[in-house]
Image (cartoon, coloured by chain):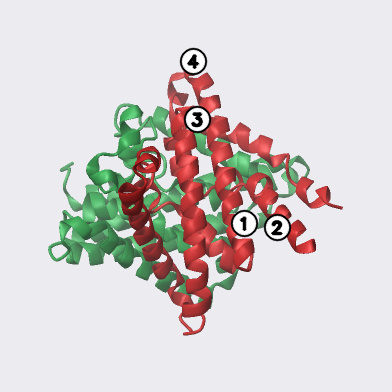
Chain colours: A green, B red
Amino acid sequence: MNKNSNMSIFLKGLLLENPVFVLILGTCPTLATTKTVIGAIGMGVAATAVLICSNIVISLLRKLIPDSVRIPCYIVVIASFVTIVEMIIHAFVPTIYELLGVYLPLITVNCIILGRAEMFANKNNVAKSALDGLGMGLGFSIALVAMATLREILGAASFAGISIPFLENYKIKFFVEAPGGFLVYGILIAVVYKLTHGKAPYKKEFSCATCPSAAYCNRGNCQPKEEI
Amino acid sequence: MDAFKSLVIILLSSVFVDNYVLTRFLGICPFLGVSKKLDSAVGMGVAVTFVMVVATAVTWPIQHYILNSMNLGYMQTIVFILVIAALVQFIEMALKKFIPSLHKALGVYLPLITTNCAVLGVAINNINEHQYNFIQSIINSLGVGLGFMLAMVLFSGMRQKIQESEIPESFKGLPATLIAASFISLAFFGFGGIIENLFK
């Protein structure tokens, strides 16, 4: 398949460049909102909406924004869309608004969104950027739902709030608490590594290179990067 | 006396029980990225604590005296992220000019925290979730920063052990690190309920 065809731009976000399991971006919301499947879906949809909108706007403005102040500009664009999405969710699905709490405004500093602006939207045209946003957003949502499904079934013996009768007596509370989040995430990264071995641009180490602000911090001379 | 007691409870619970990294998953990026060596873990912890306290000292008055009085509460996210980003840049420049030795120690970590979710998270939580007053907010930010540093320091010790051990190929690197983080988070889980009963 042609590497730059629209289809492959869309599809790469799903597995081979999955933002959560391969690019290791957006770890905070991934760990925090996957206690319940409902929360994971809410976070996935909200982040996808912000990602598509911000990718489109940043791609439209890519020739207007001066290079040296691009990150602050991106943050303002992203924060505006986050505020819009936050208000819509507050108005129409207040239960999800309560469930996500502070993680909703924190989509602003989600590395996936800033990362796609920096890596993709400021180099490509509007249609491609929108497709990239959709693919990455879907990949993020799928990863969140997969993790939340595991955690909710094991930890609360339910799926999306509907309890599973024969598991009722075998709840392992560990999985819906904070430590379970780290454990499930670690194991899932290892599984995806095994499945996509050799094909994905896999990041085995967590370093500054994965962070979209790397180019910005210390003017491209990101110090902790060297020690890792 | 009661006011003092409540401040101590806020401080201790934000360090141990409500640890932002290990129970709320805020600030995971620096926690995983800069915890390989003990000295960089300490440096990052000090820088985060410093920025959190200063950011809270600036954002709390902005929310209560500017945004709330002008009915602009919905602008919170945009205003806070811009204020924090500008503040971090400003602190970096000020340190470089006036206290070069401190800039040398903390300078490299400051730009990394501009878009750190823990800093924005604590500024928002102080106002929305806890609804603390000014003093309580400052104490809470200090506690969150110290808790972050404690988690980083403990974790950097743990990571040095992991590097020396043999792990299956798929688990090498990040997966093993995350599983180690799970254990340390489990240890902090044991603090739950202690602080509330400490002063009874």
Q: Nearer the viewer, mark 4 or mark 2?
A: 2
The mark nearer the N terminus, 3 or 4, is 4
CA–CA distance in space, label 2 to label 3: 34 Å
Q: Which comes sooner in the sequence, label 1 or label 4? A: 1
Q: Amino acid at mark 2?
A: Leu
Crowding at mark 1 (Cα within 10 Å: few <14, some 14-19, many 20+): many
Q: Residue furthest front?
A: B98
Q: Residue B7 bears which disc, if any? A: 2
Q: Nearer the viewer, residue B157 or A173?
A: B157
Q: Position of residue A20 (x, y in %)?
A: 41, 44
Q: Are marks 3 and 4 on the same chain?
A: yes
**Spatial CA span between label 1 and label 4:** 39 Å
Mark 2 / mark 3, whichever is N-terminal: 2
Count of marks placed on residues: 4
Output the chain of dot 4.
Answer: B
Which of the two marks, 1 or 4, is nearer to us in this view? 1
Name the N-terminal-most of marks 2 and 1.
2
Residue receiving disc 3 = B177
Q: Earlier in the sequence, mark 1 or mark 3?
A: 1
Labels 4 and 2 positioned on one and the same chain:
yes
Q: Which residue is mark 1?
A: B139
Which residue does the image show at 30% across and 50% down from the upper left? B97
Cα–Cα span, label 1 and label 3: 31 Å
Of the numbered discs in the image, which one, if any, rests on residue B164? 4
Query: Chain under label 1?
Result: B
Classify the position of the N terminus of chain A by image quarter: top left
Choose between A158 and B19: the one closer to the eye: B19
Position of B143 compared to B95: left or right?
A: right
Asked if labels 2 and 4 touch by Cβ distance under 8 angstroms, the answer is no
> In the rendered structure, are the residues bearing label 1 and label 3 in contact, judged by CB atoms less than 8 Å apart?
no
Residue B50, percent across and down?
48, 50
Q: Are marks 2 and 1 in contact (CB under 8 Å)?
A: yes
